[in-house]
Amino acid sequence: MSGAVALRRPVLGSVVAVDQGSVRHSAANLDDVEVGRRFAAGDECALALAYERWAGQVHGMAVRAFGPGPDAEDVTQQTFIAAWTGRARFRPEASPLPAWLVGICRHKIADTWARRERQRREADAAMSQAQAAPVAGYGPGVDSVVADRVLVLDELDRLGQPQRGIIELAFFADLTHAQIAERTGLPLGTVKSHIRRTLERLRSRLEGDGAALPA
Amino acid sequence: MQHCLPEQLALAALREPLPDDDALHLAACDRCRGEVTSLRRAVDAVAVPELAEPGPAVEPPPSVWAAIAAATGTTVAPDSLTPEPVGAQVLPFRSRRRGLVLVAAAAVAGAVLGAGVTAVLRGGDATESVTAVALDPLNDEQASGRAEVVVREDGSRALQVDLEAPALDGEYYELWLIEPQVVDMVPLGVLRPGTQTFELPAGLDLGEYPVVDVSVEPIDGDPTHSGVSVARGQLDS
Ligand SMILES: [Zn+2]
C-alpha cells in the first residue's frame, strides 16, 4: 500500500506554480521581435508564445512533407526542442524567430528523409546479402540528393546576413533576383553577387565533402 | 569567345531566364553550361516543395506541446492550450517528466469546505453528509453521477460516489480530487460504475482540491492522470 502511495506521489504538487497571468495578459501582446529577443534570452514564456504563434506554420510544413501523423508530429516537436536547446545560436537581430524555426524544421524534414534512406539502404543490403545477388536499387542518385540536402541546409546555417536571407528567398520562396532586391531593398548588383558567391560556397561544400558525389 | 558573367551563370543555375545574348551563348558553350550544372547541384538538392516556404498552417495535437514541455522542462503553456477560465470544462494533459503541465485555469466559485466544517460536524450521526455535487459529463461523454462528502463519527471523511457510465475494456475509471488550476491532484482510486466509497486523506483540504474528476486510464503503469476526463463536478459547501 505504501508502495502505491509512493508511486503516486509525483503527481502531487510536482508542478511549480508559475504566474500564468503574465503569459496570458502581458506577454500576449508582445510583438514578434520581442518574443524573439526573449526566446534568445531563455524566457520560457517566449517558448510558449513562439509555439502559440508559429507551431501551426511549422506543423503545416511537417504535414506537407509527411502527412498528418507521428512523423509530422515528431518533426514539429523536434523543431521546437532544437530551437529551444539551441537558442544560444539564434540571433534575434539577424533574423525573425519564425524564419529561424522554419529553417530548423527544414533540417528536421531533411534528417527524417536521410534516416529513411539509410534504413532503406540497410534493408537492401540485408536483402541482397540474403539473396547473394546484386540489388537493382531505386535509381541512381537518390541517396546522394538526400545527403546533398542535409549538407546544403547545414551550410545555409553558416551563412551570415544578408546572404542567408537572399539565398533562402531564391531557394524557398522562388523569387527572382529582381524580386529579392525589391523585397530586401538591396541593390540588384549586390543581390546578384551574393547569390553567385553563395552558390559557389555551396558547391565547394558539396564537392569538398565528398560524401555524396554524383553518380 | 565572350563567356557569360559568373553572376549570370548563377542566375541560370537558379533557372532564372537570362537575357537573349547570354541565353544564346549558354546554349552553345560547354564551359558555361558545365559551370551552371555544377552550381545547380545545391539548388536542386533543396528545390523540393516540401522545403518551400510554409503553406497553410496546421495546428498540432496537444501531445506535441506536452512532449516539448517534457523535453525542455518548461512549466509554462501556450494560451491556446490554456483556455480562459470558463468553468470546469478543462482537461489537463499529461507530461511524463514534470507531472501535469499547467493547462487550465478554472475559476474557484463559491465558498470552500475546509477542516473547520468537518470539526463542527463531529459527534453527529454515524455519518453526516456535508456536501454533494453532481458529476456532469465532459465532452459528450456517457459518464455522469454524484459525489458526496461524508463525515464519520470519528471525524474521518469519505467520498461516496455514484457513477453511471459504460463498462470499460482494457481501461479503467479513476477518481481524482483536483485543485482549480488543474495542476495538482490527489488520486483517490479505481472507480467502477455503481456506488463506491473512497477514504479521504486526513488533513486534505477540500477547499484546495474541490474538483471531483473521473478519468479513463489506460492500463499502462503510468500513475499520472491520462488527461482524459469524462465527468467532473466542483465541490462547494
Ligand atoms: Zn561560355
Image (tube, helix red, strand yellow):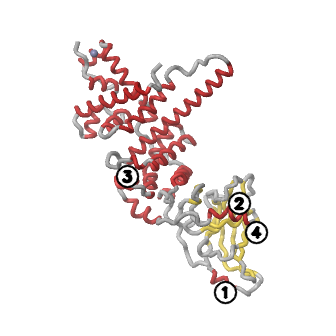
Question: Cβ–Cβ below 8 Å for labels 4 and 1?
Answer: no
Q: Which labelled disc corresponds to residue B196?
A: 4
Q: Which labelled disc corresponds to residue B173?
A: 2
State the separation of the CA atoms marked 2 and 1.
Answer: 33 Å
- Amino acid type for the residue under numbered disc 4: Gln
Q: Are marks 3 and 2 on the same chain?
A: no
Occupied quadrant, residue A103 = top left
With B96 as the anchor, is B14 left or right in this view? left
Q: Which labelled disc corresponds to residue A36?
A: 3
User: Which quarter of the figure is the N terminus of chain A placed in?
Assistant: bottom right
According to the picture, the residue beneath numbered tag 1 turns out to be B120
With B204 as the anchor, is B8 left or right in this view? left
Q: Chain of mark 2?
A: B
Q: Secondary structure at mark 4?
A: strand
Q: Quadrant of ligand 1?
A: top left
Q: Earlier in the sequence, mark 2 or mark 1?
A: 1
